[in-house]
Image (tube, rainbow, N blue to C red):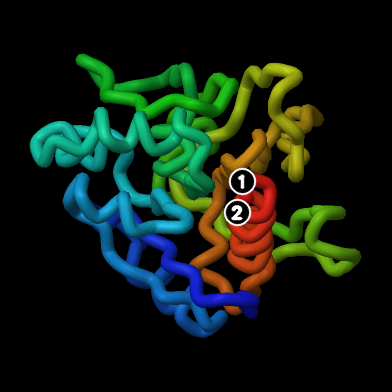
Amino acid sequence: MASSPLTIGVLALQGAFIEHIQMLRQLGVNAVEVRKPEQLTALDGLIMPGGESTTMGLIAERWGLVEPLRQWVHGGHPTWGTCAGMILLAEQATGQKQGGQPLIGGLNVTVNRNYFGRQTESFETLLTVPQLGAEPFPAVFIRAPAITEISDKAEVLAEVHTPTGADVIVAVRQGPILATAFHPELTSDNRWHRLFIEMIQANASASN
């Protein structure tokens, strides 16, 4: 898939990082687990996976990763957050646990941390995503967040029609940042991973 060898890191503090790594490797990418600040320097892109966002944030604090991750994201490096990773990338989050959690920021949105409810209210649905082509994407939502406010800097890529009749944003792109409220790594459809690889390649071309 990649025109030249790329190294994409997957933040491996907690959550569904192994599935991302497997899908990236299937696409011919050098995918590595990231747990230390110094590992960021060798990367072309970084994925912040799904999991438990509060736990991920606390582990990142404990391991001295919060500020290096902020510098990475705010430095214009390609970053993709899925589910909990999307929460970490948001500038603001609502519905947080008592005491809150550290946010990396960089994505000009407000995220409702547990918009779709508890684990038992997890669901799958087909999303229309023009950037991925005509075929709908089979999205898996697990205790998923949603974007409730968005600036004009961010481009909406996908929305879900809720039982209340409203559409809620579940995927956005802002420059080199990609964010999805669902788990593409838990499907056999690699189009989101291919899109992220294309974003990394475009970012590298623009920097040269």
- Could you tell me if residue 139 is visible in this image? no
Label 1 CA crowd tier, 10 Å (few <14, some 14–19, many 20+): few
In percent of the image, x 75 and y 36: which residue is there?
156
Q: Please state which of residues 204 and 146 is positioned toward the viewer in this rendering.
A: 204
Determine which of the numbered discs, if any, sits on residue 38 in the image. Answer: none
- Find the residue positioned furthest to the right: 134
Rendered image quadrant of residue 110: top right
Label 2 CA crowd tier, 10 Å (few <14, some 14–19, many 20+): few
In percent of the image, x 58 and y 21: which residue is there?
108
In the depicted structure, whether residue 190 falls above or below residue 154 = below
Quadrant placement of the N terminus: bottom right
Q: Position of residue 139 (x, y in %)?
A: 63, 59
Q: Please state which amino acid type lies under the numbered disc 1.
A: Ser
Locate residue 112 relative to residue 207 in the image: left or right.
Answer: left
Q: Position of residue 60 (x, y in %)?
A: 20, 38
Q: Please state which amino acid type lies under the numbered disc 2.
A: Ala
| Discs 2, 1 touching: Cβ within 8 Å | yes
In the depicted structure, whether residue 77 falls above or below residue 18 = above
Q: Please state which of residues 55 and 45 is positioned toward the viewer in this rendering.
A: 45
In percent of the image, x 37 and y 60: which residue is there?
9
Q: Position of residue 207 (x, y in %)?
A: 61, 46
Secondary structure of residue under mark 1: helix
In percent of the image, x 69 and y 17: which residue is there?
151
Determine which of the numbered discs, if any, sits on residue 204 in the image. Answer: 2
Q: To which residue does mark 1 refer?
A: 207
